[in-house]
Every structure is written in structure tokens, then in C-alpha cells.
Amino acid sequence: GAPPLPALLPSFTATAPPPNGERAFQRCYACHSVDPKEEGLPGPNLAGVVGRRAAALEGFAYSPAMRQAGARGLTWTETTLDRFLADPEAVVPGTEMFMPRMRSAADRAAIIQYLKGR
């Protein structure tokens, strides 16, 4: 049966809830997917990205800058993803990922936690 009504209502606390990773990831869906079966997008599929070496996804045409970063050993950890989302050009100079810097540390953390579960 359906859950009782109170389970459907959000809980309210004195502090703001942490950002929802799926909601924060919405800005990324224009170019990326976390569905491992989805291909043909402008950006690489991000399913399983945490722990993966940069430019290592088979079948995606990475930029020369990203391929070089991967060859140098760049691996997508929580730390490197945080730095990249905050300033992609600083982490991979010449990257073709065009997005404004993600200034909110909370949004970056929420997205990274969301990606860890994919």
C-alpha cells in the first residue's frame, strides 16, 4: 500500500537541509548522464566516474587536454572532482568542458556524493 501521509511530507528543521545531489546534478544533464547505457552525449558518461582515471571511458572522444591529464595519472577522486568542479581550467588546462565555476562547496559535495552512488 501507499506510505502513510507523514512520510510524504518534508521534515522541517532549524537549519537548511544539505543540497540534494540529484537536484544539484541537473545542471550537468545537458552534457552528461549517469545511466551506463546512455551514449552519444556531448560529455562522457559519469556512471562509475569516482575512482576512474580521467579520459578512460571507452568509446568517448576526449579532448587532447583531458587525454593528457589521464596519461599523467589524473584520477577522479572526491578531491580532484571537487577541484575540477570549482575550476575546470585550473585542473585540466585546455579542457573542453564549458561550465561556469561551481562556487558552492555544498553543491559540489552533493554532486560528488550523488556520483559516488552511480
Image: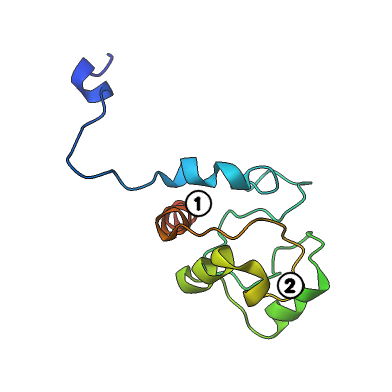
Q: Is residue 48 visible?
A: yes
Relative side of 78 to 11, left or right? right
Question: Residue 18, image x and y in percent?
Answer: 32, 48
Query: Residue sitting at 47 percent across and 73 percent down?
Result: 79
Looking at numbered disc 2 in the image, what kind of residue is underneath it? Answer: Met
- Which is nearer the eye, 19 or 67? 19
The correct choice, above or below, for 108 with respect to 69 in the image is: above
Question: Residue 69, image x and y in percent?
Answer: 70, 79
The correct choice, above or below, for 107 with respect to 22 in the image is: below
**Quarter of the figure with residue 62:** bottom right
The correct choice, above or below, for 74 with respect to 31 in the image is: below
Query: Residue sitting at 48 percent across and 53 percent down?
Result: 111
* Residue 118: numbered disc: 1
Kindly report the distance in space between the C-alpha atoms of the residues bearing marks 1 and 2. 22 Å
- Residue at image mark 2: 66
Question: Residue 105, image x and y in percent?
Answer: 43, 61
Relative side of 18 to 39, left or right? left
Circle 1 or circle 2, nearest the eye: 2
The correct choice, above or below, for 31 with respect to 50 in the image is: above
Residue count near mark 1 (Cα–Cα under 10 Å), binned few <14, some 14–19, many ≥20: few
Relative side of 68 to 84, left or right? right
Question: Residue 116, image x and y in percent?
Answer: 46, 58
**Quarter of the figure with residue 60:** bottom right
Q: Earlier in the sequence, mark 1 or mark 2?
A: 2
SS type, badge 1: loop
SS type, badge 2: helix
Looking at numbered disc 1 in the image, what kind of residue is underneath it? Answer: Arg
Query: Residue sitting at 64 percent across and 56 percent down?
Result: 100
